[in-house]
Amino acid sequence: MSDSGTVHTPRNPDWERVVRESFARQAYMTLIGARIAALAPGRVSLELPFRDDLCQQRGFLHGGVTTAIADSAAGYAAFTLMPPKSSPLTVELKINLLAPAAGERFVATAHVLRSGRTLSIVEADVLAEAKGVRKPIARMLATLICLENTSDAPERTAV
Protein backbone atom coordinates (compact mmCIF):
# COMPACT_ATOMS: atom_id res chain seq x y z
CA MET A 1 0.00 0.00 0.00
CA SER A 2 1.37 3.40 -0.92
CA ASP A 3 0.73 5.23 2.35
CA SER A 4 2.19 8.70 2.02
CA GLY A 5 2.70 8.99 5.77
CA THR A 6 0.17 11.84 5.90
CA VAL A 7 -0.88 12.73 9.42
CA HIS A 8 -4.64 13.26 9.59
CA THR A 9 -6.49 15.33 12.16
CA PRO A 10 -9.98 14.07 13.02
CA ARG A 11 -12.79 16.64 12.93
CA ASN A 12 -14.64 14.73 15.64
CA PRO A 13 -12.82 14.64 19.00
CA ASP A 14 -14.84 11.51 19.86
CA TRP A 15 -13.94 9.75 16.59
CA GLU A 16 -12.70 6.48 18.09
CA ARG A 17 -15.81 5.79 20.18
CA VAL A 18 -18.11 6.74 17.29
CA VAL A 19 -16.26 4.45 14.86
CA ARG A 20 -16.18 1.49 17.27
CA GLU A 21 -19.89 1.85 18.10
CA SER A 22 -20.76 2.06 14.41
CA PHE A 23 -18.68 -1.01 13.57
CA ALA A 24 -20.41 -2.93 16.38
CA ARG A 25 -23.72 -2.27 14.55
CA GLN A 26 -22.40 -3.78 11.31
CA ALA A 27 -24.48 -6.96 11.24
CA TYR A 28 -22.68 -8.30 8.16
CA MET A 29 -19.22 -7.82 9.69
CA THR A 30 -20.47 -9.65 12.80
CA LEU A 31 -21.95 -12.41 10.65
CA ILE A 32 -18.68 -13.08 8.84
CA GLY A 33 -16.53 -12.67 11.97
CA ALA A 34 -14.57 -9.53 11.01
CA ARG A 35 -13.14 -7.33 13.74
CA ILE A 36 -11.19 -4.10 14.05
CA ALA A 37 -7.48 -4.95 14.30
CA ALA A 38 -6.11 -1.39 14.26
CA LEU A 39 -7.61 2.06 14.30
CA ALA A 40 -5.99 5.48 13.82
CA PRO A 41 -7.09 8.76 12.24
CA GLY A 42 -7.40 8.09 8.51
CA ARG A 43 -6.43 4.42 8.82
CA VAL A 44 -8.28 1.21 9.72
CA SER A 45 -7.35 -2.47 9.60
CA LEU A 46 -9.94 -5.22 9.80
CA GLU A 47 -9.14 -8.89 10.21
CA LEU A 48 -11.15 -11.93 9.29
CA PRO A 49 -10.29 -15.52 10.18
CA PHE A 50 -10.67 -18.18 7.49
CA ARG A 51 -14.03 -19.98 7.48
CA ASP A 52 -15.19 -22.63 5.01
CA ASP A 53 -18.66 -21.11 4.82
CA LEU A 54 -17.24 -17.85 3.40
CA CYS A 55 -15.55 -19.58 0.48
CA GLN A 56 -16.42 -20.10 -3.14
CA GLN A 57 -16.55 -23.55 -4.72
CA ARG A 58 -12.74 -23.94 -4.99
CA GLY A 59 -12.11 -23.14 -1.34
CA PHE A 60 -10.90 -19.56 -1.71
CA LEU A 61 -12.45 -16.71 0.27
CA HIS A 62 -15.31 -15.43 -1.87
CA GLY A 63 -14.59 -12.24 -3.81
CA GLY A 64 -17.72 -10.68 -2.33
CA VAL A 65 -16.37 -11.20 1.19
CA THR A 66 -12.97 -9.83 0.17
CA THR A 67 -14.71 -6.77 -1.28
CA ALA A 68 -16.87 -6.35 1.82
CA ILE A 69 -13.95 -6.21 4.25
CA ALA A 70 -12.04 -3.81 1.97
CA ASP A 71 -15.13 -1.59 1.63
CA SER A 72 -15.76 -1.56 5.39
CA ALA A 73 -12.12 -0.77 6.14
CA ALA A 74 -12.25 2.08 3.60
CA GLY A 75 -15.51 3.42 4.99
CA TYR A 76 -14.26 3.44 8.55
CA ALA A 77 -10.94 4.99 7.59
CA ALA A 78 -12.90 7.86 6.02
CA PHE A 79 -15.29 8.00 8.99
CA THR A 80 -12.40 8.58 11.43
CA LEU A 81 -11.93 12.00 9.81
CA MET A 82 -15.57 13.08 9.44
CA PRO A 83 -17.25 15.69 11.63
CA PRO A 84 -19.64 14.84 14.47
CA LYS A 85 -23.18 13.87 13.48
CA SER A 86 -22.15 12.58 10.08
CA SER A 87 -22.21 9.24 8.32
CA PRO A 88 -20.04 7.74 5.55
CA LEU A 89 -21.46 6.12 2.46
CA THR A 90 -19.53 4.48 -0.37
CA VAL A 91 -20.43 6.06 -3.70
CA GLU A 92 -17.89 4.30 -5.90
CA LEU A 93 -15.32 1.56 -5.64
CA LYS A 94 -12.93 -0.29 -7.87
CA ILE A 95 -11.36 -3.51 -6.70
CA ASN A 96 -8.66 -5.60 -8.31
CA LEU A 97 -8.56 -9.20 -7.11
CA LEU A 98 -4.86 -9.95 -7.43
CA ALA A 99 -4.57 -13.59 -6.35
CA PRO A 100 -6.73 -16.43 -5.04
CA ALA A 101 -7.74 -15.64 -1.45
CA ALA A 102 -6.16 -18.57 0.34
CA GLY A 103 -5.00 -18.19 3.93
CA GLU A 104 -5.64 -18.66 7.62
CA ARG A 105 -6.75 -15.06 8.04
CA PHE A 106 -7.29 -11.98 5.94
CA VAL A 107 -6.40 -8.39 6.78
CA ALA A 108 -7.94 -5.39 5.02
CA THR A 109 -6.05 -2.16 5.69
CA ALA A 110 -7.33 1.14 4.38
CA HIS A 111 -5.87 4.62 4.48
CA VAL A 112 -7.30 7.94 3.41
CA LEU A 113 -5.54 9.50 0.44
CA ARG A 114 -7.65 12.67 0.56
CA SER A 115 -10.30 13.76 3.03
CA GLY A 116 -12.40 16.58 1.64
CA ARG A 117 -15.42 18.34 3.10
CA THR A 118 -17.76 16.12 1.08
CA LEU A 119 -15.74 13.35 -0.57
CA SER A 120 -12.94 11.13 0.70
CA ILE A 121 -10.67 9.01 -1.47
CA VAL A 122 -9.44 5.86 0.24
CA GLU A 123 -7.11 3.05 -0.78
CA ALA A 124 -7.42 -0.42 0.75
CA ASP A 125 -5.29 -3.54 0.47
CA VAL A 126 -6.34 -7.02 1.49
CA LEU A 127 -3.67 -9.51 2.48
CA ALA A 128 -4.01 -13.26 3.04
CA GLU A 129 -1.87 -14.68 5.84
CA ALA A 130 -0.78 -18.32 6.01
CA LYS A 131 1.91 -19.67 8.33
CA GLY A 132 3.00 -16.13 9.17
CA VAL A 133 3.51 -15.13 5.53
CA ARG A 134 1.31 -12.42 4.05
CA LYS A 135 0.51 -11.99 0.37
CA PRO A 136 -1.59 -9.33 -1.33
CA ILE A 137 -4.89 -10.62 -2.72
CA ALA A 138 -6.79 -7.40 -3.48
CA ARG A 139 -6.47 -3.64 -3.87
CA MET A 140 -9.39 -1.23 -3.76
CA LEU A 141 -9.79 2.45 -4.49
CA ALA A 142 -13.00 3.91 -3.08
CA THR A 143 -14.81 7.22 -2.94
CA LEU A 144 -16.95 7.92 0.10
CA ILE A 145 -19.35 10.75 0.73
CA CYS A 146 -19.77 12.45 4.09
CA LEU A 147 -23.46 12.75 4.89
CA GLU A 148 -23.47 15.61 7.38
CA ASN A 149 -26.26 15.90 9.93
CA THR A 150 -27.12 12.28 9.20
CA SER A 151 -27.15 9.72 11.96
CA ASP A 152 -24.89 6.71 11.51
CA ALA A 153 -27.49 4.64 13.39
CA PRO A 154 -29.82 2.49 11.30
CA GLU A 155 -33.13 3.72 10.02
CA ARG A 156 -35.41 0.73 10.44
CA THR A 157 -38.48 0.70 8.26
CA ALA A 158 -40.98 -2.04 7.64
CA VAL A 159 -40.69 -3.74 4.28
Image (cartoon, rainbow, N blue to C red):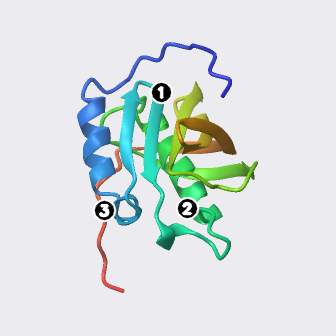
Q: What element carries label 3?
A: loop
Q: Quadrant of the N terminus?
A: top right
From this viewpoint, which residue is outermost toward the bottom? 159
Q: Distance between the residues labelled 2 and 3?
A: 22 Å
Provide the secondary structure element on which disc 2 rests. helix
Question: N-terminal of the two: label 1 or label 2?
Answer: 1
Compared to residue 100, the image places residue 51 above or below, namely below
Residue 85 visible in this rendered orientation of the protein? no
Q: In which quarter of the image is the C terminus?
A: bottom left
Residue, x 54% and y 57% (percent of image)?
68
Q: In this view, does 106 lie to the left or right of 96?
A: left
Q: Image quadrant of residue 135?
A: top right
Query: Tag 2: residue type?
Result: Val
Quadrant location of residue 63?
bottom right
Q: What residue is pinned by disc 1?
A: 42
Which tag is nearer the camera, tag 1 or tag 3? 1
Viewed as shown, does residue 1 lie left or right of 106?
A: right
Report the residue marked by disc 2. Answer: 65
Mark 1, secondary structure of its residue: loop
Q: Is residue 68 above or below residue 83?
A: below
Q: In the image, what residue type sits under mark 3?
A: Pro
Mark 3, residue position:
154
Closer to the chain start, of discs 1 and 3, is 1
